[in-house]
Amino acid sequence: MKVLLNQTVAKLGKAGEIVNVADGYAKNYLIPKKLAVAATKQVQAQWETQKKSQEIRQAKAEVEAQALAKELSKKTFTLSEKAGENGKLFGAVTTADVAEALKAQFDLDVDKKKIVIPEDIKTVGEYTVQVKLLASAVAEIRMSVVADA
């Protein structure tokens, strides 16, 4: 029996896929638990239109993310941290600090999990930080860490 998966099912498939399963498995487990629906012609047609519109949305989001990554790569932002003598910071710069600075200076909401700091930043200076907007769009932003006055 062909079913359209509503949710990802381990060892079977991801949400949105049409898979072939045993009739009993579909009728006694997948459909009652709302993990899948029977893949009738109407459901398949609806699924195709949803898939096409999702691909269009995803392509549009990818183009926008690429443009944003290109724009951000040209910018530099400043991060003020408390520092002692010789420019050594009290602690290290974290991804949360970077996300907060991006929000304040560029009004850009970035999840701290999508920010990559290639090295520990424990002194004042110039650094490069990567922001993963999408899997294919990564912006490398220059960051200037200065001592808090």
Image (tube, helix red, strand yellow):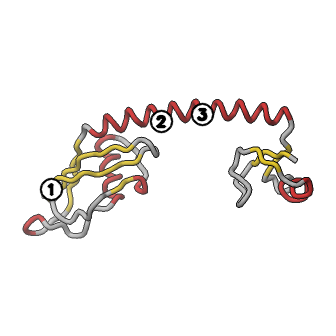
Q: Residue furthest left?
A: 86
Q: Secondary structure at mark 2?
A: helix
How many angstroms separate mark 3 from mark 2 (CA)?
A: 10 Å
Q: Residue 18's spot in the image, x, y percent?
A: 76, 44
Q: Secondary structure at mark 1?
A: strand
How many angstroms separate mark 1 from mark 2 (CA)?
A: 32 Å
The dot on residue 135 is none
The amino acid type found where label 2 is placed reads Glu
Of 82 and 37, which appears nearest the observer? 37
Q: Residue 13's spot in the image, x, y percent?
A: 71, 53
**Quadrant for the C terminus in the image:** bottom left
Of 52 and 133, which appears nearest the observer? 52
Whether 113 is drawn above or below 46: the answer is: below
Q: Secondary structure at mark 3?
A: helix
Tell me where residue 109 sits by quadrant: top left
Left or right, 102 with respect to 51, comes to: left
Left or right, 144 with respect to 52, comes to: left
Of 110 and 26, which appears nearest the observer? 26
Tell me where residue 73 sits by quadrant: top left
Residue that carries the numbered disc 2 in the rendered image: 62
**Residue sitting at x 43%, y 52%:** 111
> Which mark lies nearer to you, 3 or 1?
3
The mark nearer the N terminus, 3 or 2, is: 3
Left or right, 4 with respect to 141, comes to: right
Residue that carries the numbered disc 1 in the rendered image: 125
The mark nearer the N terminus, 1 or 2, is: 2
Tell me where residue 92 sits by quadrant: bottom left
The mark nearer the N terminus, 3 or 1, is: 3
Left or right, 20 with respect to 107, comes to: right
**Residue sitting at x 70%, y 48%:** 15
The amino acid type found where label 3 is placed reads Glu
